Image (spheres, helix red, strand yellow):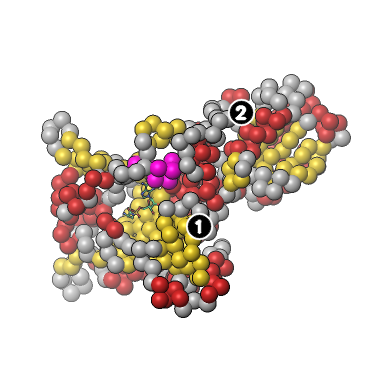
């Protein structure tokens, strides 16, 4: 992509109303623009990252055997009257009336709607287990939307719903979600710790939140430092193997890790003092097992092998996809700008042409862009008539992890520079070597 033809409205000044780094940087890097309090347009650069996160979520969910679908943003109030949440949800629920005076709402979550789909089409235990999920915009009329996309009113969320015959089956579904989430966050370059939490308006007893440690996080968290040593990695997971999944969940839930809502000071005190950690965290996901809380009042039952009708055991499992964009930036930036982890970067590599219009420089840059593209890698090529300093500042701000700099002096010896955004380390090498190195970094 040529920067001269792209839409990257970077802002030089620091926006005064943005209290945390990710909000400031997303505005400055031209990723988002506020439309109303807690509601944002995703400009092209931000949209690229959002789409990438969405793709990673889809891939990991489908590896776990979960089935994608799409439910609407607007829901009929009657479904929520059945569960009792139309009134119970309170002011966060945006209620709307259509031209026929029917009550509607902009969905803050989809338990009722998925339960309605289930009861319309599933009637037998033979059709279980079933996990359906979607990634869709949600609306919660938060009292204090703040920190940009971190606590929005409109936000993008993956929500998955599990239907099982028994509690044990539902716990296995819960475990599958925990494992798929751990892998998802790691692919995004994040360390997200599962912490025993409180279920809030979703309900249920078993729930874990996934927290990314960051000073600007809204939750206070308490954990055993030992959990930081755990890596999920590329281990093969058989999602049908109950004991195997349970063993991995046990490994990740054995060290103490809780949010302030469920913190147990006595148990915390039993951890060796040098491992007792208190910090702040950003909640990037939450999983719930809530049994028959929705299936009972809404009549979502199945027939058992013995011919009885029983309500299904359900769980719901969410990932804050749009919040993750902010969380990744909170976890990975410096005073010059964002530093994208390779797994989520909006472009794989930046190309800076130090003398636009110089035949050799232009040819070399075009070659790099083309050869990277031939290997499936997208570069953002700064081909504007700008000073070198301004081009570097833009690249540093938008945070592409690798940059190839092409200038007339180096090119005389056939050399360009490859710079790592994270360390600033720069190496001179031939054009071919720079392309190979970038390809190698991305494993292509
Ligand atoms: N139905 C369940 C699970 S699907 C549910 O709604 N869970 S939740 O309330 O915990 O939301 C799931 C995730 O969405 C949260 O972990 C958080 O990462 C994200 N989220 C929640 N509220 C907001 C918000 N106001 N702005 C941005 N992200 C949010």
At x 15% / y 71%, what residue is drawn?
A: 308
Quarter of the picture containing the N terminus is: top right
| Residue 340 placement, left or right of 169 | right
What residue span does the magenta drawing correspond to? 146-153
Q: Nearer the viewer, residue 16 or 187?
A: 16
- Tell me if residue 25 comes above or below residue 262 in the rendering: above
- The CA span between labels 2 and 1 is 34 Å
Q: Residue 224: where, in percent of width, then height?
A: 50, 70
Is the residue indicated by label 2 positioned so its CB lies within 8 Å of ligand 1?
Answer: no
Q: Is residue 440 visible?
A: yes
Q: Which mark is residue 213?
A: 1
**Of callouts 2 and 1, the N-terminal one:** 2
Q: Residue 55: where, in percent of width, then height?
A: 47, 47
Q: Which mark is residue 441?
A: none
Q: Which residue has dot 2 on it?
A: 3
Indicate which label's residue lies in the foreground, 2 or 1: 1
At x 50% / y 57%, what residue is drawn?
A: 213
């Amino acid at each position: 992509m040529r920067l001269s033809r792209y839409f990257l409205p970077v802002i030089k000044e620091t926006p005064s109303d943005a209290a945390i780094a990710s909000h400031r940087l997303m505005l400055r890097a031209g990723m988002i623009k506020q439309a109303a309090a807690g509601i944002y347009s995703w400009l092209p650069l931000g949209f690229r990252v959002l789409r990438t996160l969405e793709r990673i979520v889809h891939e990991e969910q489908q590896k776990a055997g979960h089935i994608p679908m799409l439910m609407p943003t607007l829901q009929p109030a009657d479904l929520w009257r059945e569960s009792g949440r139309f009134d119970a949800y309170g002011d966060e629920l945006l209620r709307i009336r259509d031209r026929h005076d029917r009550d509607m709402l902009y969905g803050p979550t989809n338990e009722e709607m998925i339960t309605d789909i289930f009861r319309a089409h599933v009637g037998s235990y033979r059709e279980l287990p079933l996990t359906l999920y979607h990634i869709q915009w949600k609306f919660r009329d938060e009292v204090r939307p703040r920190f940009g996309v971190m606590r929005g009113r409109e936000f993008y969320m993956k929500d998955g719903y599990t239907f099982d015959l028994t509690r044990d089956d539902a716990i296995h579904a819960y475990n599958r979600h925990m494992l798929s989430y751990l892998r998802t966050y790691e692919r995004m370059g994040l360390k997200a710790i599962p912490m025993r939490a409180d279920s809030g308006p979703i309900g249920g007893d078993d729930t874990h939140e996934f927290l990314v440690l960051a000073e600007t996080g809204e939750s206070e968290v308490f954990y055993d430092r030992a959990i930081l040593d755990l890596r999920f990695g590329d281990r093969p997971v058989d999602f049908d193997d109950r004991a195997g999944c349970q063993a991995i969940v046990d490994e990740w839930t054995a060290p103490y890790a809780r949010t302030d809502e469920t913190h147990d000071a006595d148990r915390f005190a039993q951890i060796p003092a040098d491992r007792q950690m208190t910090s702040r965290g950003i909640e990037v996901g939450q999983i719930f097992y809530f049994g028959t809380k929705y299936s009972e009042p809404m009549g979502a039952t199945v027939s058992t092998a013995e011919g009885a009708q029983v309500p299904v055991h359900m769980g719901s499992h969410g990932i804050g996809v749009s919040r993750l964009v902010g969380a990744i930036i909170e976890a990975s930036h410096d005073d010059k700008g964002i530093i994208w982890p390779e797994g989520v970067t909006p472009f794989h590599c930046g190309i800076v042409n130090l003398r636009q219009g110089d035949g050799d420089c232009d040819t070399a840059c075009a070659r790099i862009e083309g050869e990277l593209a031939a290997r499936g890698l997208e570069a953002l090529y700064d081909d504007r008539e700008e000073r070198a300093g301004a081009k570097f500042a833009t690249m540093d701000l938008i945070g592409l992890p690798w940059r190839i700099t092409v200038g007339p002096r180096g090119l005389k010896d056939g050399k360009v520079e490859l710079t790592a955004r994270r360390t600033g380390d720069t190496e001179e090498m031939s054009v071919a070597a720079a392309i190979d190195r970038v390809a190698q970094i991305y494993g292509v």
